[in-house]
């Protein structure tokens, strides 16, 4: 079985992530979307919320499942018999750091990285920009899955009321 992992913070999942996941899912028998548990960084959404939003976003992709991991990604790969990491590349600015990580992961555990260029329509998207826009009441409904948009609106309203 050809298996790959698509790792990230996903705080929250955007249409850019969904684009990469959807296309990577056509290349593998099973694609695991793995949310990083980072005890040093709280984030806007809890890991459980991020996973719930991801599950909803990939519900129509039968060979994609959502999981979480803590520590080194290569240890997760080794423990789950996953030989390939899939990463989206939005622009040249992503490439330098992504290349370093890919080389490090290969050195650590011979895990390969496959880069998927994002669709141009979503090349400007990042979770942090989406959060910033949503926080100040901007419309992000075309940039994120519906459930994420709803959750961001709830948060913005709650913050405005507090
Ligand atoms: O969505 P992000 O925040 O860009 O994802 C980054 C992520 C989670 C893929 C990266 O930080 C990672 O792999 N973290 C796990 C720790 C690790 O393995 N670090 C060494 C990378 S060479």
Image (cartoon, rainbow, N blue to C red):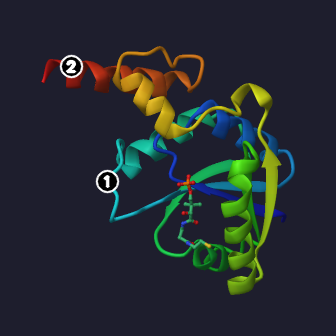
Q: Earlier in the sequence, mark 2 or mark 1?
A: 1
Helix, strand or loop at label 1? It is loop
Q: Report whether 91 appears left or right of 148.
A: right
Residue in the foreground of this view, choosing between 39 and 63: 39
| Mark 2 residue's CB less than 8 Å from ligand 1 | no
Q: Which residue is mark 1?
A: 42
Residue at mark 2 to residue at mark 1: CA–CA distance: 21 Å
Residue 154 placement: quadrant: top left
Q: Residue at 54% of width from left, 75% of height from top?
A: 72
* Quadrant where the image shows the N terminus: bottom right
Q: Residue at 70% of width from left, 30% of height from top?
A: 122
Q: Report whether 125 appears left or right of 82.
A: left
Question: Crowdedness of circle 2 by 10 Å Cα count: few (<14), some, many (20+)?
Answer: few
Residue 151 placement: quadrant: top left
The numbered disc on residue 160 is: 2
Residue 51 x/y as whole percent? 48, 46
User: Mark 2–mark 1 contact, CB under 8 Å?
Assistant: no
Residue 79 x/y as whole percent? 61, 79
Residue in the foreground of this view, choosing between 45 and 32: 45
Residue 149 x/y as whole percent? 46, 22
Outermost residue, bottom direction? 108
User: Looking at the image, in which quadrant does ligand 1 appear?
Assistant: bottom right
Report whether residue 62 is seen. Answer: no
* Vertical order, 64 against 156 (above or below): below
């Amino acid at each position: 079985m050809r298996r790959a992992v698509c790792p990230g913070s996903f705080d929250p999942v955007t249409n850019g992530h969904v684009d990469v996941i959807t296309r990577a899912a056509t290349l593998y028998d099973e694609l695991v979307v793995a949310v990083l548990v980072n005890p040093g960084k709280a984030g806007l959404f809890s890991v459980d919320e991020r996973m719930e939003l991801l599950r909803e976003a990939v519900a129509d992709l039968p060979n994609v499942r959502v999981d979480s991991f803590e520590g080194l990604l290569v240890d997760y790969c080794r423990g789950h018999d996953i030989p390939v990491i899939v990463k989206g590349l939005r622009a040249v600015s992503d490439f330098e750091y992504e290349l370093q990580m890919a080389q490090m992961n290969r050195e650590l555990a011979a895990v390969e990285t496959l880069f998927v260029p994002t669709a141009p329509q979503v090349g400007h998207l990042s979770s942090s920009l989406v959060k910033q826009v949503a926080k100040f009441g901007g419309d992000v409904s075309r940039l994120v899955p519906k459930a994420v948009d709803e959750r961001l609106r709830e948060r913005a309203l709650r913050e405005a009321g507090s």
